[in-house]
Image: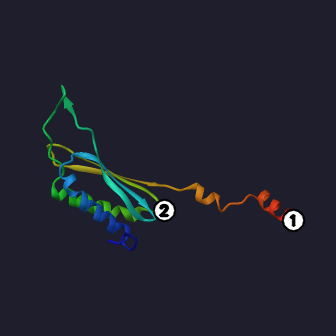
Amino acid sequence: MNLDAMPLARQVDYVFKQLEEELLHTTAGTVIIQVRNNVVGKFGVRHNPIESKNGQIGQAEQGMTPQQVQAFRQMAIDSIKLKRSWTHGEILYDFSVRTGTGAWSASISFESNYNLANGMFRYQPKYAQQALKDTP
């Protein structure tokens, strides 16, 4: 699969399809997608801590339903329309399922990253340009 030729929204769709099984067993956490040159590099799920009492891990709770995962995936795809003018960074989708009610919620964070070192090589201070002119 050539990700360079694929729009970022389709890449996010692919990510959520890959994570679907994991999301079905997760009640809360963060989906993390790292983007470089508008191409997904790494992705995964950071699960919220698993609680234990007296050193014993309790029964695993049911995570998202297939319908909730589908709605979450669609929300993630639609959120890409809000990304503006950056090509490197992370997209974080925090989510939680309220036990007993079947309701779920999610929030989205975009983080853009820039590399100053790339810009520093193009910038030449005025005194450096003058020194180059003065050398024989």
Identified by mark 2, the residue type is Trp
Q: Quadrant of residue 110?
A: bottom left
Quadrant position of the N terminus in the picture? bottom left
Gap between marks 2 and 1 measured at Cα = 43 Å
Instruction: Give the percent coordinates (x, y) of residue 69.
Output: 21, 57
At label 1, counting other C-alpha atoms closer than 10 Å, the crowd grade (few under 14, some 14-19, many 20 or more) is few
Q: Which mark is residue 86?
A: 2
Q: Provide the secondary structure element on which disc 2 rests.
A: loop
Q: Which mark is residue 96?
A: none
**Which residue lies at the image location 37% right of the left edge and 63% below the top edge?**
80
Q: Looking at the image, is 5 positioned above or below residue 94?
A: below
Quadrant position of the C terminus in the picture? bottom right
Instruction: Give the percent coordinates (x, y) of residue 66.
Output: 16, 58
Q: Is residue 88 left or right of residue 118?
A: left
Instruction: Give the percent coordinates (x, y) of residue 128.
Output: 77, 58
Towards the viewer: 72 or 25 = 25
Q: Quadrant of residue 123?
A: bottom right
Which mark's residue is nearer the viewer, 2 or 1? 1
Towards the viewer: 41 or 30 = 41
Q: Looking at the image, is 25 positioned above or below residue 9?
A: above
**Which residue is labeled 1 in the image?**
136
Instruction: Give the percent coordinates (x, y) of residue 124.
Output: 71, 60
Which of disc 1 and disc 2 is earlier in sequence? Answer: 2
Towards the viewer: 83 or 123 = 123
Q: Provide the secondary structure element on which disc 1 rests.
A: loop
Q: Is residue 136 left or right of residue 18?
A: right
Identified by mark 1, the residue type is Pro
**Which residue lies at the image location 80% right of the left edge and 63% below the top edge?**
132
Towards the viewer: 43 or 85 = 43
**Which residue lies at the image location 22% right of the left edge and 50% below the top edge?**
104
